[in-house]
């Protein structure tokens, strides 16, 4: 179903159709107001799928500055703020996609709780990435997880370890961090990292490596998540993700095979296959553990 949005009356009319679900009505109201107040108009598309609701808002505008939009007090201009920050918190998944003539916002609400399996083996062009965590079903209490995604002409990746382990709270904060990283994946990492941290700050802290791959590998390192490339193991850093002042340790690396691993894992060489990860994970210390390998075929 497609609805045009130009005035506040349009929003009231549309949201009244979704009064059966307070969360859906709230998303429509806040995202719709964002279109009316800050753009030249747009449209709303709604899908009711088997396992989730999907809400898409497409506006006509001259660009979207995520720092001004999400970080309170970032500039003298008021943020689009509270409404968008609220939406990011209440939805299960979101994407913000900038375009030349506007911005697309995608919000998803799951009808049933989705199980998060933190393991994968993916191939994109000349790269293969494989991840394994223990426990791999993060809904059990694990705070370790990671991602590897192709986004246009770049690939994004991350591996994290939420502070603490063995509780539902740790798991929920792992889900939150994953949601934020994927939500801003269409933006340059140097632009989005402060926004992700701002929205994550106030919950559990995390050790994290997050990066993007273009002609080379660029990454930020926080805490005791480390990487191994060409015999070099990065030392732990003091800066922890989720602090009000974000201390970034950054690396520009050659486009070559790299392994990321969490505290408790002893790694001296890069595993060459997904199957090898199981044996390494077995020898971990008493904690959540994770390894992400990105193989580059030259």
Image (cartoon, rainbow, N blue to C red):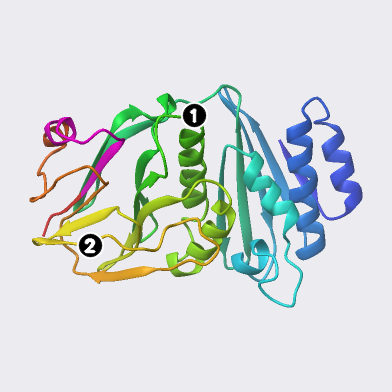
**Closer-to-camera residue (232/217):** 232
- Image coordinates of residue 226 in percent, x first then y, are 25, 55
- The label shown at residue 235 is 2
Quadrant where the N terminus is found in the figure: top right
Q: Is residue 190 visible?
A: yes
Crowd class of label 2 (few under 14; some 14 to 19; many from 20; radius 10 Å): few
- Front residue (pair 280, 111): 280
Rendered image quadrant of residue 174: top left
The residue at 76%/42% (across/down) is: 28
Marks 1 and 2 close (CB-CB < 8 Å): no
Residue situated furthest bottom in the rendering: 76
Query: Where does the image place residue 280, in percent across and percent down from the top left?
Result: 14, 36
Residue 168: which disc?
1
Q: From where the camera sits, is residue 42 visible?
A: no
Q: What span is colored magenta in the figure?
A: 279-293
Residue at image x 57%, y 21%? 112
Lower sequence index among marks 1 and 2: 1
Q: Does the magenta run of residues contain 119?
A: no
Tag 2, which secondary structure? loop
Residue at image point 74% right, 34% down: 23
Dot 1 alpha-carbon crowd within 10 angstroms: few under 14, some 14 to 19, many 20 or more: some
> Residue 254 placed where, x, y %?
18, 69
């Amino acid at each position: 179903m497609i609805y045009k949005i130009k005035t506040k009356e349009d929003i009231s009319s549309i949201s009244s159709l979704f009064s059966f679900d307070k969360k859906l009505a709230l998303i429509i109201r806040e995202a719709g107001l964002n279109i009316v107040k800050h753009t030249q108009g747009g449209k709303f598309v709604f899908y009711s799928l088997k396992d989730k609701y999907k809400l898409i808002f497409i506006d006509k505008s001259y660009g979207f500055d995520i720092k001004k939009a999400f970080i309170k007090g970032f500039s003298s201009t008021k943020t689009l703020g509270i409404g968008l920050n609220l939406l990011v918190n209440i939805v299960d998944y979101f994407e913000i996609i900038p375009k030349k003539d506007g911005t697309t916002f995608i919000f998803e609400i799951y009808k049933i709780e989705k199980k998060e399996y933190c393991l994968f083996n993916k191939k994109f062009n000349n790269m293969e990435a494989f991840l394994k965590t223990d426990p791999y079903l993060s809904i059990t209490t694990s705070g370790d997880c990671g991602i590897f995604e192709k986004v246009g002409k770049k690939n994004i990746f991350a591996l994290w370890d939420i502070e603490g382990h063995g509780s539902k709270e740790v798991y929920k904060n792992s889900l939150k961090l994953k949601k934020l990283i994927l939500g801003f994946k269409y933006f340059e990492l140097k632009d989005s990292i402060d926004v992700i941290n701002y929205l994550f700050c106030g919950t559990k802290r995390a050790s994290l490596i997050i990066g993007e791959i273009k002609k080379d590998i660029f990454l930020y390192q926080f805490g005791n998540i480390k990487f191994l490339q060409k015999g070099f193991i990065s030392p732990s850093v003091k800066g922890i993700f989720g602090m009000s002042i974000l201390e970034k340790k950054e690396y520009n690396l050659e486009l070559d095979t790299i392994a990321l691993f969490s505290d408790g894992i002893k790694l001296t060489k890069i595993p060459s296959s997904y199957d090898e990860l199981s044996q390494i994970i077995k020898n971990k210390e008493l904690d959540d553990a994770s390894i992400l390998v990105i193989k580059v075929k030259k």
